[in-house]
Amino acid sequence: MKKILVIGGTQFFGKKAVERLLKHGHEVTIATRGNKPHPFGEAVDHIILDARDAQHKGWSEVTSQQWEAVFDNVCYTKEDAELLIQKLTDVTKHLYFTSSMAVYTGAKDGYREEDFDPLTYRIDPHLQVDYGEGKRQAETILFTEAPFKLTAFRFPIVLDTDDYTERLHFYVRKALKNETIYFENEAYKVNYVKGSKAADAIVWAIENEKEGIFNVSAKDAITIGTLLDWLEEGVEKSIHVEYTGEKEMSSPFSVSHDQYLISDKIEAEGFPLAQLADWLKPLIQAIQSGR
């Protein structure tokens, strides 16, 4: 059993990770802003914390305890990373955190972990910080300055029936309404990860004290064309598709080049990956039927 602090963790795959940690017998404390009730009842301790406010009183509760592991699901910028280092240096030996496929840039036939190295990245203070740049900078600060062990999970788009962004739901609904869906090119290759698999990877890494950077995705990649075939199969009707490079017409899964992860590293260390067809096809059908 480990004493674990989870910063965030009340939605989607963060919630699933907490549920799994509890099921495995770990002592879990969640730290959230407390804007709404959390779903775990008395099974967890709860610290009210604004993780972006260095002066927030919740930090005193965090820093008054020792944590065998901390999982952060809300670190988006270098400022978030700097605050984590400031607050966690004396209270934990290992931070696990959610990063993203968005750290990778440029067209490439699949991204491997070495395609973005936070140890050599130079932060440009004049650069506009979007989501991907924020994650690059957060990784860089943590891996170059943190005195504790680190594990970063680079996820692609995460999908499941309870995905609050409902990106896959968007396509199912469009198809059922006979509305046109827009993509840039049917030949571009993509992959995703299921929410439950993302949660399993987090728990696996914590329990096995894995350290470093891990891509976590499906085992394979498919073309946009194949994705559309699976959508048609799942909703049992033809889909109206148009291909255009106009950004204002793009849809959530539309990409301008191949955009998928190669996750051989985590599989080689013992974490099993799944083929896309094994879970994405059933997921489309589950969304279509409202399950």
Image (cartoon, rainbow, N blue to C red):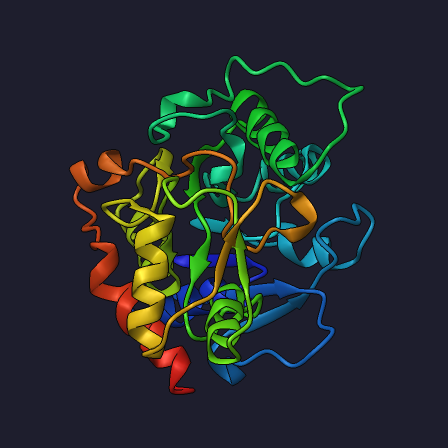
Between 16 and 18, the one nearer to me in the picture? 16
Does the image show residue 1? no
Q: Nearer the viewer, residue 87 or 74?
A: 74
Q: Residue 134 in the image: x percent, y percent?
A: 66, 35
Q: Nearer the viewer, residue 240 or 26?
A: 240
Q: Quadrant of the N terminus?
A: bottom left
Name the residue at 42% across, 43% down: 153
Numbered circles on residues, count: 0
Q: Quadrant of the C terminus?
A: bottom left
Vertical relation: 40 (above or below) 149 = below
How far from the left and from the top, in percent, is residue 281? 27, 68
Query: Residue at point 55% right, 53% down?
Result: 73
Q: Is residue 63 above or below residue 119?
A: below
Left/right of residue 39 with respect to residue 238 in the rendered view: right
Can residue 123 be seen at all in this image of the molecule?
yes
Does 250 sit left or right of 50 as displayed? left
Residue 234 picture location, percent across and down: 31, 74
- Spot occupied by residue 46 in the image (x, y as percentages of width and height): 60, 71
Q: Residue at x 49, y 29 (%)?
A: 104
> In the image, is 238 to the left or to the right of 57?
left
* Res 274 quadrant in image: bottom left
